[in-house]
Image: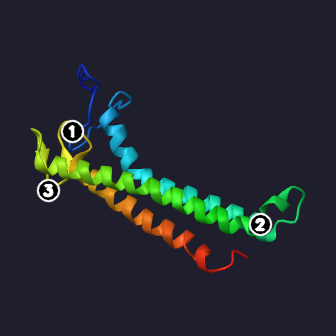
Amino acid sequence: MTPPDPAPGGATTASAGTPFPVDLSRDRRARRSWAGFIGGPVIWITHFMFVYLVAEAGCTGDGPGLEVFDPPVPRTVTLAATAVAAAACVPLAAWALRRWRSIRREPAAGTDLLAGRTGDGGGGGGLAFAGFLLSSFSFVAILFVGLPAAFLPAC
């Protein structure tokens, strides 16, 4: 089976999919949709690893150069990183929610709202809503990771 010629603006995948790979390198809407979808979890895991490594270095590190991580540095770094990461998740969740609402309000031609897909490759309402949920859950997870530092000793 030979694939059909791509559309002038770059090929996009139909809602049912295609039996061959599709080049989405020029489809900015699809990249933005995926960035909104995975942005929250990426911020959360980055925050978690950073806080964990600083606390580990400050509480158990006895090697040369690790004295800069001695307490109260882990606590201070954890609280600052938590504030920055939480502040980064809020606009990401708000953007995904606005995108989802705009897709629900003004459906384009070829839109299947129940399946959450658009026929023009625009990312779909389902992906935008999932991005909102993931960013919101990531915000809560960041608070669960960072806020104990405000009440408990780091080591």
Q: Of circles 2 and 3, which is in front? A: 2
Q: Which mark is residue 114?
A: 3
Give the vertical position of 120 relative to 74 (above or below): above
SS at circle 1: loop
- CA gap between label 3 and label 1 equals 16 Å
Are dots 2 and 1 in contact, CB under 8 Å?
A: no
Category of crowding for the residue at label 3, using alpha-carbon neighbours closer than 10 angstroms: few (below 14), some (14–19), many (at least 20): few
**Residue drawn 21% across the image and 44% down it:** 16
Upstream in sequence: badge 2 or badge 1: 1
Image quadrant where one finds the N terminus: top left
Upstream in sequence: badge 2 or badge 3: 2
Q: Which residue is mark 2?
A: 58
Q: Of circles 3 and 1, which is in front? A: 3
- CA gap between label 2 and label 1 equals 52 Å
Q: Residue 49 placed where, x, y %?
A: 62, 60
Please tell me how many numbered marks the rendered image carries: 3
Upstream in sequence: badge 3 or badge 1: 1
Q: Residue 41 placed where, x, y %?
A: 46, 57
Mark 1: which amino acid? Ala
Quarter assignment of residue 11: top left
Mark 3: which amino acid? Leu
Image quadrant where one finds the C terminus: bottom right
Q: Residue 147 placed where, x, y %?
A: 54, 73
Q: Which mark is residue 94?
A: none
Q: Can residue 86 be seen by looking at this rendering?
A: yes
Q: Which mark is residue 14?
A: 1
